[in-house]
Image (cartoon, helix red, strand yellow):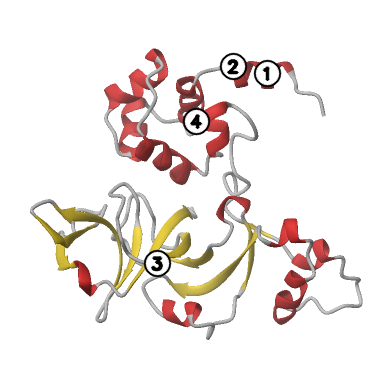
Amino acid sequence: MQESESERVEKKSSIGQRIKAIREDKGLSQVEFARAIGTQQPNVSDYETKGVVPRRGTIRNIVERYSVNEKWLLTGEGDRYLPTAENGPEYRNPATEAGATASEPTAPYSFHTLITRLPEDQKRFYIPYYDIDVAGRIEAITAGDASAKGYIYAPGFANCFACRVDGDSMYDMIYPGATVFIQEISPVTSFDPDRIYLIILDYHKVLKSVHVVPEDQTRVVLRSVNRKYEDWTIPLGEIRKLFLVKGYWNQIVN
């Protein structure tokens, strides 16, 4: 398919122009947009008008907060948004993709079988969704003791699984009721303070950012976006499992 003139122009535009396009899509001022992606308004102005390239953590925040296609953001190539951007994750019945006939079973219990029948280049785009709070029975998922309620077509989150968030510790980034896409990290060796993690302790499960204590590398600070929750410092060795939140979808219902 031939590119349109607007697509050719968009590819030639700077990353700052593409950031401005996202901000204007969302109807945000530079101040509001800066707050949402964890930076300051003068930085957003520099991105948009001076061609300053954001740091890696800011790019990730834009991609994850607004379901932006990272390749498009960096190069102008491809679609502006991932398929989940406009209406949330796309719930598909794999039966159609697998070529099931009308007489074949399509009940939820058959989805696992249908997924295995998908072409290999399509199978990895279907993310299992578990109707479990991210801070609840998450071990049931990793141990294979929980059944997926369904599958989400989410090409941007291959090799993840999805579940819900009931708490508000990461509001106003991740809303209560949101769907999160998470991936287990092993071994636990380092942390990116710009990312959000699900941390599994012996006595608790929390959704936080993780910051190594500079003067004591054996301890980390667990931090919420919602500042009504205080920072929490723990020994690094208390972390039993770690999951990276690779993306999320906030469903807002009027």
- Which quadrant: the N terminus? top right
Q: Position of residue 10 (x, y in %)?
A: 61, 20
Is disc 1 surrounded by few (<14), some (14 to 19) or many (20+) residues within 10 Å? Answer: few
Kindly identify the amino acid type of the residue bearing the numbered disc 1: Arg
Which residue is label 4 attached to? Answer: 22
Between residues 106 and 247, which one lies in front from this camera angle?
Answer: 247
As measured in the structure, the alpha-carbon distance from the residue carrying label 2 to the one carrying label 3 is 39 Å
Q: Residue at x 30, y 36 (%)?
A: 35
Residue 135 occupies quadrant: bottom left
As measured in the structure, the alpha-carbon distance from the residue carrying label 1 to the one carrying label 2 is 7 Å
Q: Which mark is residue 8?
A: 1
Q: Is residue 39 above or below residue 252?
A: above
Between residues 156 and 45, which one lies in front from this camera angle?
Answer: 156
Q: Nearer the viewer, mark 2 or mark 4?
A: 2
Q: Residue at x 8, y 53 (%)?
A: 215
Q: Position of residue 203 (x, y in %)?
A: 24, 81
Q: Position of residue 213 (x, y in %)?
A: 14, 55
Which residue is label 2 attached to? Answer: 12
Q: Is residue 223 above or below residue 86?
A: below
Kindly identify the amino acid type of the residue bearing the numbered disc 3: Ser
Q: Residue at x 47, y 75 (%)?
A: 132
Residue 206 occupies quadrant: bottom left
Q: Is residue 42 left or right of residue 165?
A: left
Kindly identify the amino acid type of the residue bearing the numbered disc 2: Lys
Q: Nearer the viewer, mark 3 or mark 4?
A: 3
Dots 1, 2 in contact, CB < 8 A: yes
Q: Nearer the viewer, mark 3 or mark 1?
A: 3
Extreme-bottom residue of the structure? 145
Is disc 4 surrounded by few (<14), some (14 to 19) or many (20+) residues within 10 Å? Answer: some
